Amino acid sequence: MKALGTAYRYGTHALRAVTGRSDPMLPPPHLHTIGTGNFRAIGEEFLGHFRDAGLKPEHRVLDVGAGTGRMALPLTDFLTTGSYDGLEIIKPSVDWCNQAYAPWPNFRFHHADVFNLRYNEGGSSRAAEYRFPFDDDTFDFAFLTSVFTHMQAAEVDRYFSELARVLKPGGIAFITAFVLDEEAKAAIAAGRARYGFKVVLEDCFADDAKVPEKATAYAPDVYARLAAPLAQTGIHPGTWRGSEGKSFQDITLFTAS
């Protein structure tokens, strides 16, 4: 599947070169760091999940881990009177998005120069100390897709605190994660799960000892403790467990008080 996804991405750009047809909202291959799959289709899929979770066209939206705008793209039609702010640690991706999304003045991308062993080794700030560059009670809806799956406990703890600060009372947080509940552990033991998470770290588990940030997972009680600034309202198990689900990762939902 990875090879097919890579072929799709590069084939799409090759087709542009041959036919002269260009989609200005598709990022160039050297900026595409978010895995395989159809860029537009995955964004549309998640817009459906966001709407199910309570996203409204008038909401002020925060996207932590904005990448090259895969989640932002379908929101350009949906957020009719709302706004979008994206935080991303890869500076060239932020620069590209600010240029590509210039026709939408209610869409803004911000560079978070946060260290991450996999994505931003030169980052000047530590995620465990990072303050989101927004005022308190700013956003109605925040989402983090495949962000906590690359972070360790102290970092996740900080981000939950920051989400609670910048969300309005009653604001919604939509977060994908790997949660090692009993069902997930049974799937791993049976060999059905995509990851094994055999590396034990402080308060979390990893799939790769050399680069833990490749994939991290949390026991339910630890995840609940880290998320304590918010109230958890639901979880939808992901297909990574080898069973049916709404998405690959576990979808976890929260509200701010």
Image: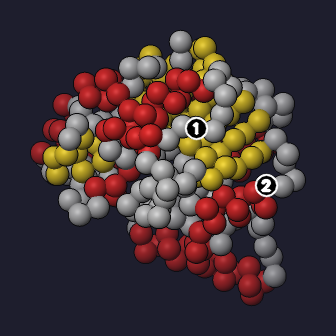
| Image quarter hosting the N terminus | bottom left
Residue at horizontal 73%, vertical 27%? 59
Q: Dot 1: within a 10 Å radius of its alpha carbon, few (fewer than 14), some, or many (20 or more) residues?
A: some
Q: Dot 2: within a 10 Å radius of its alpha carbon, few (fewer than 14), some, or many (20 or more) residues?
A: some
Query: Are the residues tagged 1 and 2 within 8 Å (C-beta)?
Result: no
128 relative to 220 in the view: left or right: right
Dot 1 falls on a residue whose secondary structure is loop
Number of labelled discs? Answer: 2
The x, y position of residue 176, in whole percent, is 44, 39
Dot 2 falls on a residue whose secondary structure is loop
Say whether residue 243 is visible. no
In 3D space, how far apart are the residues under numbered discs 1 and 2 (Cα atoms)? 21 Å
Residue type at the position of mark 1 = Phe
Residue at the limit of the structure toward the front, as seen here: 124
233 relative to 205 in the view: left or right: right
Task: Give the residue pinned by disc 2.
Answer: 101
The image quadrant of residue 25 is bottom right
Q: Is 170 situated above or below 68? A: above
* Mark toward the viewer: 1 or 2: 1
The x, y position of residue 63, in whole percent, is 61, 41
Q: Is 2 situated above or below 238? A: below
The x, y position of residue 155, in whole percent, is 39, 40
Residue type at the position of mark 2 = Tyr
For residue 188, the mark is: none
Q: Is 106 situated above or below 2? A: above
Q: Earlier in the sequence, mark 1 or mark 2?
A: 2
For residue 132, the mark is: 1
The x, y position of residue 125, in whole percent, is 48, 50
Residue at horizontal 49%, vertical 69%? 5
